[in-house]
Image (cartoon, rainbow, N blue to C red):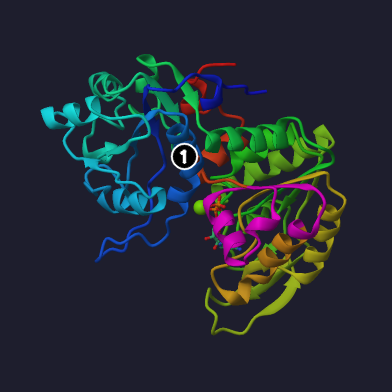
Amino acid sequence: MINKKSVEDIEVKGKRVLVRCDFNVPLDKETKEITSDKRIRESLKTINYLISHGAKVILCSHIGKTGKNLSLAPVAARLTELLEKEVPLLVDLDADETRTTIENMKEGDVVLLENTRMTEAEEKNDDAFAKKLASFAEIFVNDAFGSAHRAHASTVGVTKYLPSVCGFLIQKEIEALDHGINNPKRPLVAIIGGSKVSSKINVLLSLLDKVDTLLIGGGMTYTFIKAQGGKIGTSLCEDDKLEVAAEILKKALDKGVRLLLPVDAVIASEISDEVPTEVCAVDKIPDDKMGLDIGPKTVEIYKEEIAIAGTVVWNGPVGVFECDAFATGTKEIAKAMADSHAVTIIGGGDSAAAVEKFGLEDKMSHVSTGGGASLEFMEGKKLPGIEALQDK
Ligand code: ADP
Ligand code: MG
């Protein structure tokens, strides 16, 4: 089990605390206005704790890709509203003014450093840049779960120079994911969908050692069906992954994991809401049609598995949920999870978006805030941003 020190385990009063947040919020391309402030709101618990415990709070985050040079100015403005106190944006880390502002901070004050990806040094985990970031503070708090799978200067580099602990968001993610997957209430049922086998091989292999039942959905279904000799029409298929798919099926047998594949599919000639759809057996898809959602029989079978589960872990939509015509399977799975008494955990950016789209977020035990990070966690990988923090 992962057991890291959190902000509650250290004395923060009067201390300058550097907090790595995930303020990588979506911005309107033209107006640069924030289109969803969810990530900012998720960070408030840690920030408010530090304010009320007398810390001097120095926030930092990346936004967008290196080279895009996006400014965190809209985030500073939104934080000023949400915290009801001025949050100045310190744009130049090398300016004397920046250092003076930080030296003059009072307990409970909050500042935001400009986008850590303004320089290539961030993603290179450049030591000098990490040291510079660390030099502003006496304690480091990592609360950016969405970046915890990346060893960058502001997530891992700084931990070399400061006592480092986690914030409440990372703590919540670790508790939910680690407990849910590594110490679950059984039976543990995993639903793995999404588009490709290739992006989910590692998570499938890792889960085979942990789960009681594995339900497969989404585009990767058809690589499995073809590997078994079925007819998949023009469905998504990775021909170079047929052997891997067969190997995964064999491993499940060897390990006594019940691996279920869809029995039927919603098919159409293309991905569009305008085309007619039909339901057919998953291994008898006509040559000119593709499977774009799990069919109603599969929905019923999967719902029964969810109903008897102790824990359900879900990564990857089971159909092209972005189109209403192929969203039913994903919606039914989400509803079944929402209705079940099981511990329900959602990982993956698109899966979280699907749950949000159906308005079922509040009915789940945990919807992870980190797409890539939660996938790597489920793959059994150690996340460098979490590893680097002090143990309890
Ligand atoms: P997550 O972000 O939750 O890990 P992925 O990125 O792996 O999920 O996959 C999400 C994508 O998979 C969605 O955009 C969805 O349209 C696509 N998808 C699901 N089912 C199919 C299918 N049958 N054929 C093609 N694409 C699919
Ligand atoms: Mg995705």
Which residue is rendered at x = 57% and y = 66% of the image?
357
Judged left or right of residue 43, residue 70 is left
Which residue is rendered at x = 27% and y = 30% of the image?
105
Q: Quadrant of the N terminus?
A: top right
- Pointer 1: what residue? 48
Judged left or right of residue 345, residue 12 is left
- Front-most of 37 and 240? 37
Which residue is rendered at x = 74% and y = 58% of the image?
338
Q: Is residue 279 above or below residue 237?
A: below
Ligand 1 quarter of the rendering: bottom right
Q: Find residue 199 and report its horizontal and vertical position in percent.
A: 54, 45
Badge 1 crowding class, 10 Å Cα cut-off, few under 14, some 14 to 19, many 20 or more, is some
Say if residue 143 shows up in the picture. no
Judged left or right of residue 269, residue 337 is right
Q: Quadrant of residue 184?
A: top right
* Residue 286 inside the magenta-drawn segment: no
Report how many numbered discs are placed on residues in the image: 1
Q: Find residue 214 and report its horizontal and vertical position in percent.
A: 76, 46
Q: Find residue 341 and report its horizontal and vertical position in percent.
A: 82, 51
Q: Is residue 294 above or below residue 141?
A: below
- Front-most of 27 and 285? 27
Say if residue 383 shows up in the picture. yes
Q: In the structure shown, which secondary structural element does the residue marked by tag 1 occupy?
A: helix
Image: magenta residue range = 337-366
Q: Quadrant of residue 257?
A: top right
Which three-letter amino acid code belongs to the residue tagged 1?
A: Asn
* Residue 350 inside the magenta-drawn segment: yes
- Front-most of 165 and 193? 165
